[in-house]
Image (cartoon, grey):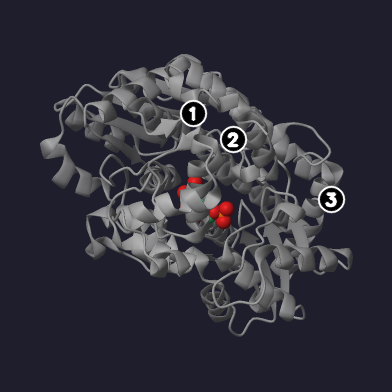
């Protein structure tokens, strides 16, 4: 059997979310403009119309069913809770949605009913905490605590790869108590591709839980939302399409529930698919600014190549989008936390996270724009790139004053600005920036959830900027992350896989030995090391400070 055939069979065996996307196979050799074309084509796969796609009848119908559950919860808010939960990016999106939708309820003088759980707690909102992802019992315990005293819980467990043991543990708890819980699994693989590896302290695996969910779905007691959106542009990097598709789908479902209550709109397949179409338009509009986006990717790449930094300064939830994008560069590209950093106006006051101000936990948790002025501005230089993220509804005077302060240090100052056709950002404000990616949204766009649309567009831009910059810096080979840290079992498997057939064509045991040599920093891999379980290896890798590939 030749190597190409072996690689091909191997690729076929991988779940969709771990596959190498043929569209991006040469992304490491692309210039900034070509790279954008690649990212645009990969993202467009989210909306491809096929029988398992996001627009397909079974997926839209499941969205309708879940939206109706949301409506029910909203009708009896005192005894109900909607919990969104996940690890890494999935947990961050859960946080963003739960806090934003609670805010919407407050605006309607309605009781807040949303809560979020992220593996590793609030510190995982800003830093990579990969190890708790492997703990199913911890997930179940955290869910149990959050739901204490509630009669009805709609639980949305997000795992793009349908692989996180933390989420599997939570779904298992729900399935054992269907009198209280209605579990929803959101992911982007078919059920038969859910992970089937044994989990820590557990007798079941993710796939088995997903199969039990599928059985309960027949009775309307559980739901699986798993459209196929194609492999990521950087293999396995679910912060990109996975995170965006999560946001699009859950917002559609939650908004439909809200509109049923507050606007008496019937929840129908049409209203759900029209939100997906609106999101598709956002992607098209965002990528139509190809020249400005190319310039941002190019500039960010140059900054990183010169050991400079990229700083996102964002207002309101656009600040959160910036911080999320920045925090993900550490586990994905082996970046230093200072390479790309996000700051938000009003810092933690704007975050509204459960655990409050975390700034005493270390420099990674210092996130206010005033902190930027106090600690970063004095040492800023021309190699550093600054990107402002704001909308016409933000405090434009405050924003211009800060931009002028930054400009005294560097002209490498850019903006992603969202405007409505009816409300214009004054030209003199745009003139402060070298590049302004000015997104104009037609005033006929429904005013509803306009902030959510601006967030999605900003996410798409920043994913392109940070991914593109790291590709230009050489942190990607073909379309594989090669500076990843092996800090949980999913990443360990991914590392072995990359080593294995893809790069070396050697056998799995041989590649695993090579990986163990890197983890334990030794050429002498002992019997004790090879016989230890994956958890022991990832614990060791967690203690090492450097990427292993
Ligand atoms: C991916 C990101 C990771 C994942 C996390 C959860 O780009 O770095 O932190 O979000 O591993 O993955 P999943 O498949 O359970 O949503």
Considering only order in the chain, which callout, 3 or 1, is on the residue closer to the N terminus? 3
| CA neighbours of label 2 inside 10 A, class few (<14), some (14 to 19), many (20+) | many
Q: What x and y, as percent, mark residue 276? A: 71, 38
Please tell me whether mark 1 sits on a helix, a strand or a loop. loop
- Crowding at dot 3, Cα within 10 Å, few <14 / some 14-19 / many 20+, comes out as some
Image-based side of 51 in relation to 342, left or right: right
Depth check: give the residue in front, 131 or 448. 131
Mark 1 to mark 3 CA distance (whole Å): 38 Å
Q: Foreground: 136 or 537?
A: 537
Q: Mark 2 against mark 3, which lies toward the viewer?
A: 2
> Is residue 484 at least partly visible in the picture?
yes
First in sequence: mark 2 vs mark 3: 2
Residue at 15% x, 29% y is: 381
Q: Which mark, by number, is residue 154?
A: none
Q: Which residue is mark 2?
A: 20
216 relative to 447, above or below: below
User: Where does residue 329 sit, x and y in percent of width and height?
Assistant: 38, 43
Alpha carbon distance from label 2 to label 3: 30 Å
**Residue that badge 1 annotates:** 478
Q: Percent position (x, y) of residue 372?
A: 21, 44
Residue picked out by circle 3 = 61
Considering the numbered disc 3 on the image, is that residue within a helix, a strand or a loop?
Answer: helix
Disc 2 secondary structure class: loop
The answer to whether marks 2 and 1 mark residues whose Cβ atoms lie closer than 8 Å is: yes
- Quadrant, the C terminus: top left
Count of marks placed on residues = 3
């Amino acid at each position: 059997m030749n190597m190409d055939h072996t690689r091909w069979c191997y690729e076929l065996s991988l779940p969709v979310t771990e596959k190498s996307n043929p569209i991006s196979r040469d992304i490491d050799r692309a210039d900034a403009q070509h790279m954008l074309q690649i990212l645009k084509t990969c993202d467009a796969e989210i909306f491809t119309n096929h029988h398992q796609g996001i627009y397909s009848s079974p997926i839209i119908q499941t969205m309708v069913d879940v939206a109706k559950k949301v409506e029910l919860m909203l009708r009896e808010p005192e005894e109900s809770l909607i919990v969104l939960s996940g690890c890494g990016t999935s947990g961050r999106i859960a946080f963003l949605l739960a806090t934003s939708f609670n805010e919407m309820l407050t605006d309607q003088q309605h009781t807040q009913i949303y809560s979020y759980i992220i593996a590793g707690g609030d510190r995982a909102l800003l830093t990579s905490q990969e190890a708790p992802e492997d703990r199913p019992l911890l997930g179940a315990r955290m869910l149990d605590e959050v739901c204490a005293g509630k009669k009805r819980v709609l639980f949305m467990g997000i795992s793009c790869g349908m692989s996180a043991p933390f989420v599997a543990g939570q779904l298992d708890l729900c399935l054992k108590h269907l009198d209280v819980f209605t579990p929803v699994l959101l992911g982007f693989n078919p059920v038969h591709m859910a992970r089937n590896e044994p989990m820590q302290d557990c007798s079941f695996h993710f796939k088995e839980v997903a199969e039990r969910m599928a059985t309960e779905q027949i009775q309307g007691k559980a739901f699986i939302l798993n459209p196929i959106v194609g492999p990521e542009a950087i293999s396995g990097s679910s912060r990109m399409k996975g995170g965006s598709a999560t946001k699009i789908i859950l917002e559609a479902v939650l908004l439909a529930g809200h509109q049923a209550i507050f606007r008496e709109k019937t929840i129908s397949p049409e209203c759900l698919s029209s939100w997906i179409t609106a999101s598709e338009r956002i992607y098209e509009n965002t990528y139509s600014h190809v020249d400005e986006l190319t310039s941002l990717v190019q500039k960010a790449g140059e900054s990183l190549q010169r050991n400079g930094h990229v700083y996102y300064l964002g207002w309101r939830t656009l600040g959160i989008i910036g911080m999320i994008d920045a925090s993900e560069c550490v586990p994905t590209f082996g970046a230093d936390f200072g390479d790309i950093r996000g700051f938000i106006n009003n810092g933690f006051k704007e975050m509204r996270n459960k655990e409050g101000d975390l700034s005493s936990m270390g420099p990674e948790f210092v996130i206010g724009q005033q902190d930027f002025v106090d600690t970063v501005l004095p040492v800023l230089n021309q190699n550093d790139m600054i990107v402002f993220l704001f909308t016409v509804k933000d405090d434009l005077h405050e924003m211009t004053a800060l931009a002028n302060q930054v400009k005294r240090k560097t002209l490498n100052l850019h903006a992603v600005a969202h405007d409505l056709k009816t409300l214009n950002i004054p030209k003199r404000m745009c003139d402060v920036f070298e590049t302004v990616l000015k997104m104009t949204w037609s005033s006929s766009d429904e005013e509803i959830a306009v902030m959510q649309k601006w967030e999605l567009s900003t996410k798409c831009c920043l994913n392109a900027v940070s991914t593109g910059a790291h590709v230009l810096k050489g942190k990607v080979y073909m379309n594989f992350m090669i500076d990843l840290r092996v800090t949980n079992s999913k990443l360990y498997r991914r590392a072995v896989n990359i080593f294995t057939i893809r790069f070396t064509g050697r056998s799995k045991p041989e590649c695993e030995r090579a990986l163990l040599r890197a983890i334990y920093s030794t050429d002498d891999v002992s019997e004790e090391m090879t016989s230890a379980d994956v958890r022991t290896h990832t614990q060791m890798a967690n203690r090492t400070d450097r990427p292993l590939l």
